[in-house]
Amino acid sequence: MDGAVSPSPSAIPQAELDRITDELIAAFKTVYDPEIPVDIYELGLIYKVDINDDRHVDIEMTLTAPGCPVAGEMPGWVEEAALKVDGVKSAKASIVFDPPWSPAKMSDEAKLELNML
């Protein structure tokens, strides 16, 4: 044995994890930054999503700017979106600023929408 530790398999079947992941992405795409007409997923504001065996979803996200006027509200919007996904029991969105957001994190779809391509 080489001493490596294998992660424990999830109690949630892989097919269901895949479905929940796809539906979370779709849910995040319903949340928009009010200053930019593009959803938060395509803007690259979602950094990390973890689903534990209790079906709790932890979301690390950022904002386009630290002084964003909806900084206090947006995590709640993201949590509400996640809770609409069948199979998600609870959700917590946390704002992080490391690494800082930049337009380079946007998808090509977002750049096209904003005429940045």
Image (cartoon, rainbow, N blue to C red):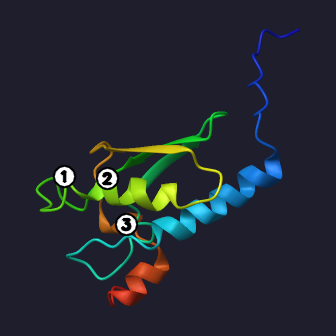
Return the residue at label 3. 104
Nearer to the camera, 2 or 87: 87
Q: Secondary structure at mark 3?
A: helix
The three-letter amino acid code for the residue at tag 3 is Ala
Above or below, comparing residue 74 to residue 40 in the picture: above
The nearer-to-camera label among 3 and 2 is 2
Determine the image quadrant of residue 44: bottom left
Q: Are marks 2 and 1 in contact (CB under 8 Å)?
A: yes
Q: Give the mark, 3 or 2, whose residue is nearer the N terminus.
A: 2
Relative to 58, is 55 on the left or the right? right
Return the residue at label 1. 72
Relative to 72, is 48 on the left or the right? right
The nearer-to-camera label among 3 and 1 is 1
Q: Position of residue 65 (x, y in %)?
A: 18, 59
Question: Image quadrant for the C terminus?
Answer: bottom left
Q: Secondary structure at mark 2?
A: helix
Q: Secondary structure at mark 1?
A: loop
Q: Position of residue 68 (x, y in %)?
A: 15, 60
The three-letter amino acid code for the residue at tag 1 is Gly
Return the residue at label 2. 75
